[in-house]
Image (cartoon, rainbow, N blue to C red):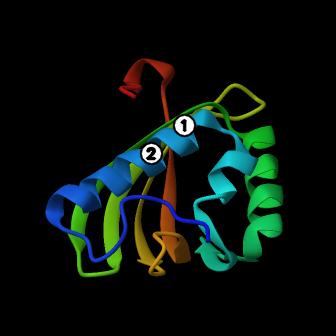
Amino acid sequence: MEQKLPLPPFTLETAKQKIQLAEDAWNSQNPEKIALAYTIDSEWRNRNVFVNGREEIVKFLAEKWKKEFDYKLKKEYWAHTDNRIAVRFEYEYKNKEGKWFRAYGNENWEFDENGLMKKRYASINDLEINEGDRYL
């Protein structure tokens, strides 16, 4: 049986650990590694895109990082319950034309009993920034 520690029910400490693990994984930009934190049939809403299952997660992330260069993400604890975590995040990236952006958003996560994320709902807004305004 696959497990991803820490397992629910979450405490404040373990929720923050789970968030840091997710941040580190996404900053690796390794879609295959990232997908292992999700259930086989995980459901995502990422902006207006719906993604279902690990295979689609890998494809989605691989396409994402073909368009978002010098990606750097920071996630921040917002709230949690026994098997759910809410985070606030921001990330910076450069597009193929060399313009910089900061994306802001919120994510709601739901985990199964093995610590795998079965639902991820992300609301995200992008703001063009000057390179000198970067802080991540």
- Location of residue 21 in the rendering, given as x and y in whole percent from the top left corner: 43, 47
Is 88 left or right of 40, judged from the image as shown? left
Position of the N terminus, as image quadrant, is bottom right
Secondary structure, mark 2, is helix
Quarter assignment of residue 59: bottom right
- Residue drawn at x 48%, y 81% as measured from the top left: 112
Q: Residues within 10 Å of mark 1 (few under 14, many from 20)?
A: some
The front one of 99 and 124 is 124
Q: Kindly tell me whether residue 128 is visible in this rendering.
A: no
The front one of 36 and 69 is 36
- Disc 2 marks a residue whose amino acid type is Glu
- Residue drawn at x 33%, y 63% as measured from the top left: 87
Is 116 left or right of 23, judged from the image as shown? right
- Location of residue 102 in the rendering, given as x and y in whole percent from the top left corner: 48, 42
- Location of residue 97 in the rendering, given as x and y in whole percent from the top left corner: 76, 29
Q: Kindly tell me whether residue 40 is visible in this rendering.
A: yes
- Residue indicated by mark 2: 23
Looking at the image, residue 85 lies above or below residue 24: below
* Disc 2 and disc 1 in contact, CB within 8 angstroms: yes
Looking at the image, residue 54 lies above or below residue 27: below
Looking at the image, residue 103 lies above or below residue 98: below
Position of the C terminus, as image quadrant, is top left
- Residue drawn at x 73%, y 41% as measured from the top left: 65
Quarter assignment of residue 109: bottom left
- Residue indicated by mark 1: 27
